[in-house]
Image: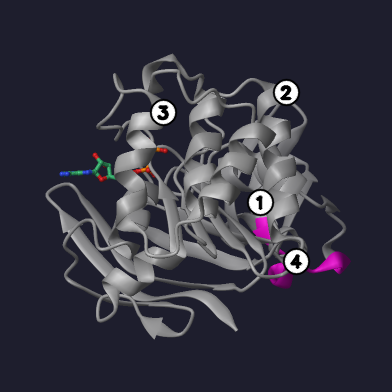
Amino acid sequence: MFALEVKGINKKYEHFELKDVSFELKKGYIMGFIGANGAGKTTTLKSILNMIHVESGIVKVFEQNFIANEIEMKQKIGYAFGGTDFYTRSRVKKVTSVIKNFYTNWDDETYKNYLKKFEINENKKIIELSAGMRVKYNLAIALSHGAKLLILDEPTSGLDPVARDNLLDIFQELVEDGEMSILFSTHITSDLEKCADYITYLNEGQIINSCEKDAFIDTYLLLNGSEKQLETVKNKLISYKTNSFGFTGLMLAKDYDPSIGIKSAVPNLEEIMIYYSKKENKYV
Ligand SMILES: Nc1ncnc2c1ncn2[C@@H]1O[C@H](COP(=O)(O)OP(=O)(O)OP(=O)(O)O)[C@@H](O)[C@H]1O
């Protein structure tokens, strides 16, 4: 079963466009949504949640049309976007007392348990919570209203390595029973190496690849060769860098011919992102 299906989202801003964005997240898994600054990650997540108008596209959550069942669907989704806190000067306790009224399945006991687990003091003001605490507070809210799908925009940004690791452990714990699914955007590739089952990669408003993490990495090869060898593969490379020894370039694994004798290695996620973002400018 799919927790989320996104089909053909098109959204136009004056200087930016989401083009036919489609991908699926299986129930019980974590998907990392990656892309450089300005690739359109936030715009995609907001489009999914009907927070902005789109020209076209269909979103299904647990196989139901999101827009047609929006109120019911929002009970099942926990979402968090950075910088959209309306209540920063209010205390946690006060904010929760307002928010919980929106949710029919709110469970006070679950909420108290998560506050304790996440060590959140209800008497603090939202503004006094650290970045990591705020993410955890959002999670506590989502989990207390029975959300089964979390959509989180850059939850790890601004967290120190320890807080980030801790949050990624929590994500993994949450999906353990197979009921929770998480879609989170990030440009920190080590987040994905640690906890994503699936990766969806967005570049300049278009999905480049969306699949299991290992398959994602296996799609590409990093080639190292001489300047002369570069001439023989240039037109098949996604992009390349030249240096005093020759070149390093990214290629689709299916385009690689071992008989040409150019050394190849498996790239890491960061290398894939770097070479893809340079696609327009082949001389990087
Ligand atoms: N309300 C808006 N009006 C016009 N353009 C917008 C609007 N919101 C976003 N954009 C543009 O859409 C593009 C994608 O922005 P978006 O915030 O979705 O990217 P992102 O991948 O989330 O980036 P980041 O990693 O920096 O958060 C950017 O060029 C941005 O300037």
Mark earlier in primary sequence (1, 4): 4
Mark earlier in primary sequence (3, 1): 3
How far apart in space, not on screen, are marks 3 and 2 (Cα)? 24 Å
Say few, some or many: other residues with alpha carbon within 10 Å of mark 4 (under 14 / 14 to 19 / 20 or more): few
Q: Which residue is labeled 3 in the image?
A: 92
Q: In this view, does 52 lie to the left or right of 7?
A: left
Mark earlier in primary sequence (4, 2): 2
| Coordinates of residue 163 in the picture (x, y in percent) | 67, 26
Specify whether tag 1 is near ligand 1 (CB below 8 Å): no
- Residue placed furthest toward the front: 109
Element type where label 1 sits in the image: strand
Q: Which residue is labeled 4 in the image?
A: 177
| Coordinates of residue 111 in the picture (x, y in percent) | 55, 45
Q: Which of marks 3 and 2 is in front?
A: 3
Q: Which residue is labeled 1 in the image?
A: 250
Amino acid on which disc 3 is placed: Val
Mark earlier in primary sequence (3, 4): 3
Mark earlier in primary sequence (3, 2): 3
How far apart in space, not on screen, are marks 3 and 4 (Cα)? 29 Å
How far apart in space, not on screen, are marks 3 and 1 (Cα)? 48 Å
Against 241, residue 39 (above or below) is below
How far apart in space, not on screen, are marks 1 and 4 (Cα)? 38 Å
Quadrant showing the N terminus: bottom right
Q: Which residue is labeled 2 in the image?
A: 162
Q: Is-magenta flag for residue 16?
A: no
Say few, some or many: other residues with alpha carbon within 10 Å of mark 1 (under 14 / 14 to 19 / 20 or more): many
Element type where label 4 sits in the image: loop
Say few, some or many: other residues with alpha carbon within 10 Å of mark 2 (under 14 / 14 to 19 / 20 or more): few
